C-alpha cells in the first residue's frame, strides 16, 4: 500500500504528517476530516490508528507567501506550475488506539510514532477493528483545534462506510453518543443530525 504522508511531529496523543507529493503513475489517496489513518511502529510491533482532525495547506516557509492570481487551477498549472511545489499540506491526527497482531487496543500507545514514519490510509479491516468499541469517541472529544462535534460526526460517517452492517453500526453509535452526552441533550441531538444530515 502507498504511503500518504510522513510524520514530522508526534506525541502519544497525536501527530502531524506532511502529505507526500503525487506522482502521475501513483496518485496519493486523499484523506480529510474524520478519515482513519495508520502508522506501522516497528519499535513496538503495533499499528497506531488515528483520526484526521485537521488538514492545513500553507507555504513551506515565511519567505514564499501565497497570493491570489485570479486564475483557475487548470490555468495555474499551465502558467504557474512552480507555485504548487512551494506549498505543503499537513495532516493533523489524534490517536484513537492501536492494533497488535490484528487485535484492537482502545487506549493510547506506549510510545508516540517516530518522526519520519510513514502514514497510510487505514483499510476496512483496521477501521472495523478499532471502531468495534466506541471508546475512540471519548478521545476525539478532547480535540480542541476544530469543533469536536463536527469531528465526531465525520469519524462516525467515515467508519460507517467500512462496516459490514452500516445500519447496525450507526444504531450502536447513537447509543454510544447517548451515554457520552447523557447530560447534554441538545448536543446529542446536534451530533446525531450531523451524522445523518439528510434524515
Image (spheres, rainbow, N blue to C red):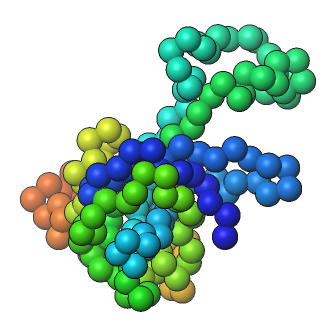
Q: Does residue 118 show up?
A: yes
* Residue 46: % across, % down: 39, 77
Examine the image and state in which quarter residue 43 appears. Answer: bottom left
Q: Nearer the viewer, residue 2 or 145?
A: 2
Q: Nearer the viewer, residue 168 or 41?
A: 41
Q: At 32% from the left edge and 38% from the top edge, which residue is drawn?
A: 145
Compared to residue 104, the image places residue 109 above or below, namely above
Q: Nearer the viewer, residue 114 or 49?
A: 114
Q: Is residue 112 left or right of residue 68?
A: left
* Residue 86: % across, % down: 66, 25
Examine the image and state in which quarter residue 174 appears. Answer: bottom left
Compared to residue 117, the image places residue 38 above or below, namely below
Q: Does residue 136 show up?
A: no
Compared to residue 75, the image places residue 143 above or below, namely below
Q: Nearer the viewer, residue 29 or 185?
A: 29
Q: At 74% from the left edge and 11% from the top edge, which residue is drawn?
A: 69
Q: Is residue 120 left or right of residue 45?
A: right
Q: Is residue 81 left or right of residue 144?
A: right
* Residue 60: % across, % down: 56, 26
Q: Residue furthest right?
A: 78
* Residue 150: % across, % down: 38, 48
Image mark count: 0
> In the rendered image, which quarter contains the N terminus?
bottom right
Q: At 42% from the left edge and 69% from the top edge, which residue is drawn?
A: 41
Q: Residue furthest front?
A: 43
Amino acid at each position: 500500500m502507498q504511503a500518504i504522508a510522513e510524520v514530522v511531529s508526534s506525541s502519544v496523543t497525536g501527530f502531524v504528517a506532511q502529505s507526500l507529493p503525487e506522482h502521475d503513475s501513483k496518485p496519493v489517496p486523499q484523506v480529510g476530516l474524520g478519515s482513519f489513518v495508520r502508522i506501522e511502529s516497528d519499535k513496538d510491533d503495533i499499528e497506531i490508528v488515528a483520526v484526521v482532525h485537521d488538514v492545513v495547506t500553507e507555504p513551506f516557509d515565511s519567505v514564499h507567501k501565497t497570493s491570489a492570481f485570479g486564475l483557475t487551477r487548470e490555468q495555474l498549472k499551465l502558467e504557474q506550475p512552480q507555485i504548487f511545489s512551494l506549498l505543503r499540506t499537513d495532516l493533523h491526527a489524534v490517536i484513537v488506539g492501536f492494533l497488535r497482531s490484528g487485535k484492537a487496543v482502545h487506549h493510547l500507545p506506549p510510545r508516540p510514532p517516530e518522526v519520519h514514519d510513514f502514514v497510510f490510509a487505514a483499510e476496512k479491516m483496521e477501521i472495523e477493528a478499532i471502531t468495534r468499541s466506541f471508546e475512540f469517541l471519548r478521545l476525539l472529544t478532547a480535540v480542541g483545534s476544530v469543533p469536536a462535534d463536527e469531528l465526531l460526526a465525520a469519524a462516525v460517517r467515515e467508519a460507517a462506510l467500512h462496516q459490514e452492517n452500516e445500519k447496525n453500526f450507526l444504531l450502536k453509535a447513537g447509543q454510544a453518543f447517548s451515554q457520552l452526552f447523557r447530560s447534554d441533550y441538545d448536543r446529542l441531538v446536534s451530533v446525531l443530525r450531523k451524522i445523518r444530515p439528510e434524515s
